[in-house]
Image (cartoon, grey):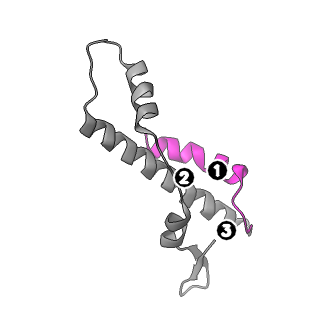
């Protein structure tokens, strides 16, 4: 986990280094099936452009989750991010991404 020091002496997460290490692969077919399963009307169709956009938003959500979990780990002076750090950031993340 990369850290930057600011003027006040506090450590910060370097978002560029975290995002460079985030590897997320979203299969469009899986996202499409998930979305199609939630449509109430069978006539509702999902266009390729909309599907691509939803996949990109999902990738942004994964990246933001990683950044927040890394921030929690840093505050706890941990060298590794584990599932506990992810769980701690989920409630606020769910409010930010309704």
Q: Where is residue 88 in the image (x, y as percent from the top left)?
A: 65, 49
Is there a contact, CB below 8 Å, between mark 1 and mark 2? yes
Name the element at disc 2: helix
Q: Name the residue under label 1.
A: 86
Q: Mark 2 points at which residue?
A: 65
Specify few, some or many for label 2: CA neighbours under 10 Å numbering under 14, 14-19, or 20 or more: some
- Name which of mark 1 and mark 2 comes first in the sequence: 2
Quadrant of the rendered image containing residue 74:
bottom right
Image position of 80 (left or right of 32)? right
Q: Which mark is residue 18?
A: none
Image position of 50 (left or right of 8)? left
Q: Where is residue 60 in the image (x, y as percent from the top left)?
A: 43, 52
Rounded to the nearest whole Å, what is the CA distance between mark 1 and mark 3?
12 Å
Q: Tell me, yes or no, whether the highlighted magenta stretch contains residue 45.
A: no
Q: What stretch is highlighted in magenta?
A: 78-98
Residue at the image position 60 percent from the left and 75 percent from the top: 2
Q: Where is residue 18 in the image (x, y as percent from the top left)?
A: 54, 67
- Name which of mark 2 and mark 3 comes first in the sequence: 2
Specify few, some or many for label 3: CA neighbours under 10 Å numbering under 14, 14-19, or 20 or more: many
Q: Name the residue under label 3.
A: 74
In this rendering, the count of numbered labels is 3
- Name which of mark 1 and mark 3 comes first in the sequence: 3
Does residue 92 sit above or below 13 in this rendering? Answer: above
Residue at the image position 26 percent from the left and 22 percent from the top: 45
Rendered-image quadrant of the C terminus: top left
- Observer-nearest of 11 and 18: 18
């Amino acid at each position: 986990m990369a850290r930057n020091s600011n003027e006040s002496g506090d450590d910060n997460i370097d978002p560029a280094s975290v995002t460079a290490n985030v590897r997320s692969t979203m299969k469009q077919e899986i996202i499409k099936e998930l979305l199609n399963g939630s449509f109430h009307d069978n006539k509702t169709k999902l266009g390729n452009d909309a599907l691509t956009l939803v996949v990109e938003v999902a990738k942004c959500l994964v990246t933001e989750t990683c950044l927040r979990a890394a921030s929690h780990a840093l505050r706890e002076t941990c060298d590794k991010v584990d599932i506990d750090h992810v769980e701690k950031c989920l409630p606020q993340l769910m409010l930010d991404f309704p």
